[in-house]
Image (cartoon, rainbow, N blue to C red):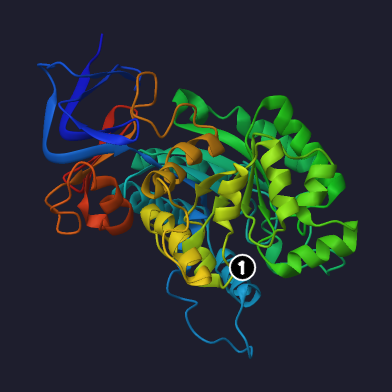
Amino acid sequence: MPNKAWLPDLVYVDGRFESGRTIVCDDAGKIVRVASEGVPEAVRLQGRALLPGMVNAHSHAFQRVIRGCTEHRSQHNTDSFWTWREEMYAAANRLEAEDIYNISRMAFLEMALTGITAAGEFHYIHHQRDGSPYSDPNLLEREVIRAARDVGIRIALLRVAYARAGYQTEANPLQVRFIEDLDVYLQRLEQLLDVPELDGGMAWVGVAPHSVRAVPLDYLKPIVAFANEHELPVHMHVAEQPAEVSACIEEYGRSPVALLETEGLLSKRFTAVHAIHVTPKAIASLARAGAFVCACPTTERNLGDGVVPVDAYFDAGVRIALGSDSQIQIDLLEDARELEYHLRLQKMQRNVLAPDLARKLFDCATVSGAMSIGLHGGGKIEAGSPADFFTVDLDDLSIAGATADSLLTNIVFSLSRTAVRDVVVGGKQIISHGLHG
């Protein structure tokens, strides 16, 4: 029997806001119906609009610790992604297991407070600070899962494979906490699949070969084969930096996307994270495979990575997910609007991704993100979907005065994070009136 029901002023259903609709959930945390009739036991959410929970498809939770610490000119003449990376590595090597838990919990709590109900955690710190394994080799993975569980959001733990510093590059001592050989990686991945924390649908595992620079082809292929055998999502940094593309061409005679396609490694479970420096041919390859792209505009602008060619991806039918990545700012709606705004700056015109601009961008933050990380039915308010949703205060100054017809556009382009008032995950309310508890 249904045990929980919520009645807000407006509910986002099938791309529009409707009034008089009640969300009814069962004990398993699923939506059983979106009722148009009255439900006596419904919790009245007056002055609220209810939307499906957002999905953060690419997160490095531990990088929350360096927020604000790299916004200065380094000793190098020119700062770049590569100089930022050295500072990030240094921070990663100072963290103990308890630090990983605390920082992850802080990042996940910030996500929940902004309406994010699930995260794809691209996790690559595996070992102790000296590079030796913990007695439980998946200790840090379990600490990250525990942090998500304690906040109350879902997590896809995307366990990262990291084999080398780069093509024809000497070993980097700052990467000793990341690197594992193939047999060790697969063994620990199998062990992680059996940990008790994965019960209940709140946590699951995916595979994340870091990038073509960090994972050579003879390592990469068995990992993707393992993922295919177990039907796991596969996420990988692809073409984030021009130097990565050049190194891949030097090593394999092909660009990263061409390498992945010709080796049969692209699929509907594959997500190319960033995928900025790509050709029309590469975009067509991702489209043919049904692969996803995860854009992280807030991080990409912070690191000077470049602009994801979202218009070309949409034209080709490639689905776009969103990620907070380095946690410089956790606001998936900001990332959604930046998809459009970056293109406006680049092309010097407006409404580049029109028509249905707001819906396209919101779908990136919800439906596409859920599919990317393997959250079946996520990102929707409909019967059978997870009961994951958030509400916004219709009287918040950032959206006050919006009509039902203009509300989604106001939310996508103008909503303040403080307007998020309630968050429910799996039928359990984790945020109430803007507070966690």
Horizontal side, residue 249 vs residue 427: left or right: right
Q: Is residue 431 above or below residue 230?
A: below
Q: What number of labels is visible?
A: 1
Q: The residue tagged with tag 1: helix, strand or loop?
A: helix
Q: Quadrant of the N terminus?
A: top left
Q: Amino acid type of disc 1?
A: Tyr
Please state the horizontal and vertical placement of residue 153, each as a whole percent of the image.
38, 39
Q: Residues within 10 Å of mark 1 (few under 14, many from 20)?
A: some
Residue shown at 80%/50% (left/top)?
Answer: 258
Please state the horizontal and vertical placement of residue 323, each as a whole percent of the image.
49, 52
Residue shown at 58%/35% (left/top)?
Answer: 205
Horizontal side, residue 420 vs residue 383: left or right: left
Q: Is residue 162 visible?
A: no
Horizontal side, residue 84 vs residue 436: left or right: right
Please state the horizontal and vertical placement of residue 391, each as a whole percent of the image.
23, 41
Q: Nearer the viewer, residue 152 or 45?
A: 45
Q: Quadrant of the C terminus?
A: top left
Please state the horizontal and vertical placement of residue 48, each as a whole percent of the image.
16, 40
Q: Is residue 166 above or below residue 238?
A: below
Q: Nearer the viewer, residue 102 or 300?
A: 300
Q: Nearer the viewer, residue 196 or 59?
A: 59
Q: Which residue is mark 1?
A: 89
Q: Quadrant of residue 386?
A: top left
Residue shown at 20%/58% (left/top)?
Answer: 398
